[in-house]
Structures are given as C-alpha cells and as structure tokens.
Image (spheres, rainbow, N blue to C red):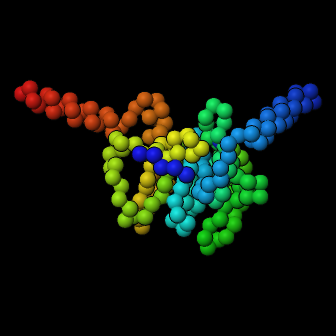
Amino acid sequence: MTISASDSSRPRTKKRSTRSLSKRTRNTESLTSPTVHLHGVLVDVLGVGVLLLGKSGIGKSECALDLVMRGHRLVADDLIKVERSEEGKLYGSSHELGRHLMEIRGLGIIDIGKLFGIAATRDRKRIQLVIELVESDVEIKDLTGLEGESYEILGVRLPLRRIPVRPGRNLTAIVEVAAREYLLEEEGYHTAAQLEERLITKMREGGKE
C-alpha cells in the first residue's frame, strides 16, 4: 500500500576550497532538483534519516526532542524542504531561518544547537524511513509487518511505519527500534518474514508426523 504526499596554511586552504566547491555543487543541484515542502520532523536516528509525520499536536516535536536527548540528531522541525537527487534519493533540510530550531508546546522556540551542541544537529540528511504518528483509535491492519506499507514523495517510495499514540507509550524507543529494524532489513533480515518461515517449517514437520 502506497500513501502519497531530495600546521600549515596550504592544507587548510585546500580543505576550505573543497568544502566550498561541495557546497556550491549542492546549491546548483538544489536549484534544478524536484522539490517539495512537508510539515513534519526529520531526525537522524542511528544514521537513518527518519521522517516523522502526523497531525499537528500529536507529539512529533516532543518525540524528536527526546531522540536528541538520547544522542540522535535533529535535521529539521516543522517545515522540511525535500529534494530528489538525480539518483532518485530524497534529501531533507531545514530552511535557513528555522535551522536547528524546534517548537515545543509550553516552551516555545528552542535552539537545539545551543542547548545540546552542534553534534546534536545536522543541516541535511537522506530520508530513508517514514514514521507516521496516528491517533490510538486508528486501525492498524498490518500487525505483523509482513505487508509493508510505503509512502511516496516526489515519485520515490519509502517504507512507512504507522505508530498509534497512547498515554504512557514510549514513542522514542519505538522509533529507535524502527530504525534498527530498517538497518536489519537493508542487510536482508526481515523479522516477520523469518517468523513466517519458521511457522511454515513447523507446520510441514507436524504434517509428516
């Protein structure tokens, strides 16, 4: 199922020139790349670019703040600029005015870079996994994860996980586990598929007895 919505001066000079060239190249690509703006939060979790979606007030920013406090990195909060590269990969970033800033209800605007250090933020990240926070009464049909929903952005399909929000539920831990599961699946290991295979094997063995 798909849901729709990129100690000498010489070494230092060379390094600055390389960074400058890289930045100019990205800026040029940015002008020509397909682009869309999404409301959500983008976080780097264990090296995985996780896009948190959900209606206003459901807890996306609070979840992202908790992730930052666990050592993960904020990319963008609220308005995310998404670009598709020539290779068909999606990259997200924050607008200049809102870079490293986050809005937390009850606190207002906070600066993640100033509060937690520059290591708690990054300017740009490839988007690899979409997690949608939904109300607790929303029916989740795929309870095992075998069907595998996807979310489409700029013609690129990304794996989608839908997480019901309930009082007392540790959303941060669930998001971390979702990122770890994504990394496992990238290596070819799918937990639900492994369980299904074991059940089928067990049933076949039982039929022979």
Q: Position of residue 182 (x, y in %)?
A: 47, 39
**In the depicted structure, whether residue 26 falls above or below residue 106:** above
How many numbered marks appear? 0
Residue positioned 72% across, 49% down in the render: 118
Whether residue 109 is visible to the viewer of this picture, yes or no, is: yes
Q: Position of residue 183 (x, y in %)?
A: 49, 36
Residue positioned 43% across, 64% down in the render: 135
**In the depicted structure, whether residue 201 falls above or below residue 115:** above
Q: In which quadrant of the rendered image does the C terminus lie?
A: top left
Q: Quadrant of residue 91?
A: top right
Q: Position of residue 176 (x, y in %)?
A: 49, 48
Q: Quadrant of residue 1?
A: top left
Q: Position of residue 84 (x, y in %)?
A: 65, 40
Whether residue 66 is visible to the viewer of this picture, yes or no, is: no
Q: Residue furthest right?
A: 9
Residue positioned 65% across, 47% down in the render: 82
